Image (cartoon, coloured by chain):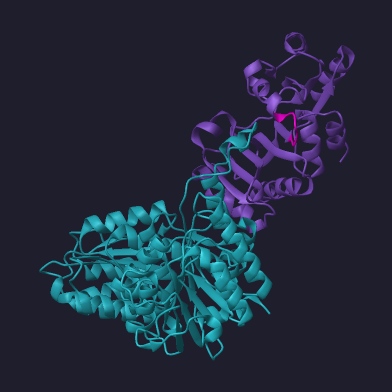
Amino acid sequence: MGIYEDLYPIFYPESVAVVGASNQFRKSGFFCMESIISRGKYRGKIYPINHSASEVFGLKSYPTISDVPDKIDLALITVPAQAVPGVIEECGKCNVKGAVIITAGFKEVESETGKQLQNDIIKKANHYGIKIIGPNTFGVINPLADLNASFTSMLSDIKQGDIAFISQSGGMCHFFSYITMDDKIGLSKVMGLGNRCNVEFVDLLKFLEKEDATKVIALYLEGIDNPRGLYETAREIAKNKPVVAYKGGAAKGMEHLTRSHTGTLAGSFEIYSGMFRQAGIALAESSTELFDIAKIFSLARPPKSKNIAVCSPIAGPGIVMADTLIKNRMNITKFTDQTNARLTKLLPPYTFRYNPVDMPFAQDIETISAVIDCVLADKNVDSLGFIMCQQEMFTPLCSGIAHALVGAKNKYKKPVAVAMIAQAYKFHSERSYLQNNSIPVYPTSERAARALAALAEYGKIVHR
Amino acid sequence: MNVLKKAIINGQSSLSEYESKQILSAYQIPVVKEILVDNNKDFINALKETGYPLVLKGCSPRITHKTEKNLIKLDLRNEDEATRAYNEIIASIDGKKTVLVQEMVKGTRELVVGLTRDPQFGPTVMFGLGGIFTEILKDISFRLAPLEKNDALDMIREIKGHKILEAVRGMEKVDIDILADILINVGKIGLENEKINEIDINPLIISGNKPIAVDALMILESNNTVRDNTQLKA
């Protein structure tokens, strides 16, 4: 069997056993039950496993896995570390396909016992052919199967979407989930890998490559178990699905002696960033940027070139956007004479009518729509960064501008991103309308620009 | 590869400049024309064959940072100058007195190409601005070997100073194809010769529009590395 078939039961289980399920608030077995039952929408069978209780969360409970009169695909394990090897042994005997081990206290702790327990688990799991996510993970969420196998029930509210997030850290999973939920962006997977017993980044990349519903892969990594394998796998996948990564953790492993200039200059960050570029992975420089780039990859199609136009009703954010684009190797393109002639007619001579287009005096929707159309029609323009602004003159126009942007984007099939200079809770319907129509919206010019640049960079691979 | 085998048998911890360039040549990397001499008669013949201006360098696997030790004499314009320089170098070398007689390559654009073995990713190629500014500007990019042509072209474009490779200030546009092949082949050296731990080609000078390796250093995998380290970096 391939890795896709091996991992499928973990993400799309027909039945889940929660080992350590509990009615007692504050136990992780309680929170896991809440995730999967109370708040969750999971429609498969759920079997609480608890030594003493006869019912957990209103469901019949069983003392051990072997007592369950049904086959079990996934075991979600929350019992104390010392009990885990025994549970895995039982899972193996009962033909359980996969396990998510929430429990901490293994390789990550200082004591030798933790390491021994983990080795014990690996040995048993490999013997029975059980794939394990964790231990020491917050869990796994597959919105596509309405499955929240984690200890955070809030995350059952994640929308279905096409971005998969794989993370070394559960904390980053929470960050990524909340920022996407607030922005109404959907996800196809969220998973914390924890201590990585027999499932590592490369395996999950291979699984996600085969899963059609996942269109974008976002990674948060610190160390890597199999760096060369990650590079080679990602390089293959990136040809078909965009991958964006954020690398945390201090440089390690470069303390080896070196006597050449090259050796002295080769820090681990420089080599990682070269490796990411070479593999075709977009490199995010912050956790927000990891989300920003994943979002534009999910919503927009990559442009043919790095030639871009910027339009803004307010000069500063337009200039900052152009600066950031240039710093990120985008080309603030020269318009054709025809475009320049049209813009000269449309806009009064008080502002800069070339690229970036400064349009504070375009205060009717007809003029603004005509400017947008004429800029995107230009053959020297392959993408557009547009700035919208909460200001009494423009606020009434925002809905019309959103429609004009969507119309022109669809007509010319060129990606557009918007920087919305406004209070976070304003323009709710415009934001949704734009993002539902494949125009990502960002709160600052710089964030929109960095996302547009990453999209154009990925375009080089797609259009190679 | 004979040069490499011999060096390993001799217990060398690095290759001399001359040996390093023999390996580069074997991998189709253009190197400066040079003759290695260890006596006066060969030296005089080498002067005639090379022509002026020329460069003299003290050459031995024990010497890795020549500038600091005053073992490089540039732009020598006649036999008198060359002979005086030769005697000075001979006087400063400890051990075997061998000297490289080298054609003086003209070109204001200096690049660096290198190889390191990353403990995680294996042989990794470096490209950047060369000469005395390499370690000050750190304008460099890295790619894992093996490199495809696209990888090589992309790493060339990645450095901030990549515009110096274009036709600027009356200089010719650099032959990027040759440059890309050099990067690919340095990666190949790393993949095919496990005993070579690190490579520096610095400077790789742009002469006309073509890159040419003017100085080179190869560090070998060696248990003696620790002992030799202080001496070599001095």
Can residue B12 be spotted in the picture? yes
Residue A80 as seen in the image, left or right of residue A421: right
Q: In terms of depth relative to the viewer, which is nearer, B181 or B142?
A: B142
Total residue callouts: 0
Question: Residue A463 in the image: x percent, y percent?
Answer: 55, 70
Residue pictured at 74% horizontal, 21% vertical: B52
Residue A298 as seen in the image, left or right of residue B51: left
Residue pictured at 84% horizontal, 16% vertical: B43
Q: Main secondary structure of the magenta part?
A: loop
Question: Residue A19 in the image: x percent, y percent?
Answer: 47, 76
Q: As displayed, is residue A294 above or below residue A428?
A: above
Q: In terms of depth relative to the viewer, which is nearer, B26 or A264?
A: A264
Q: As displayed, is residue A121 above or below residue B90?
A: below
- Image hue for chain A: cyan
Residue pictured at 67% horizontal, 36% vertical: B200
Question: Residue A91 in the image: x percent, y percent?
Answer: 58, 78
Is B131 included in the stretch rendered in magenta?
no
Residue B20 as seen in the image, left or right of residue A379: right
- Image hue for chain B: purple
Residue pictured at 81% horizontal, 36% vertical: B22
Question: Residue B182 in the image: x percent, y percent?
Answer: 70, 46
Question: Looking at the rendering, in which quadrant would you find the C terminus of chain A?
Answer: bottom right
Residue A201 as seen in the image, left or right of residue B7: left
Q: As displayed, is residue A451 above or below residue A435?
A: above
The magenta span reads: B220-225
Can residue A134 be spotted in the picture? no
Q: As displayed, is residue B73 above or below residue B14?
A: above
Question: Looking at the rendering, in which quadrant would you find the N terminus of chain A?
Answer: bottom right
Q: Quadrant of residue A373?
A: bottom left
Q: In terms of depth relative to the viewer, which is nearer, A213 or A418?
A: A213
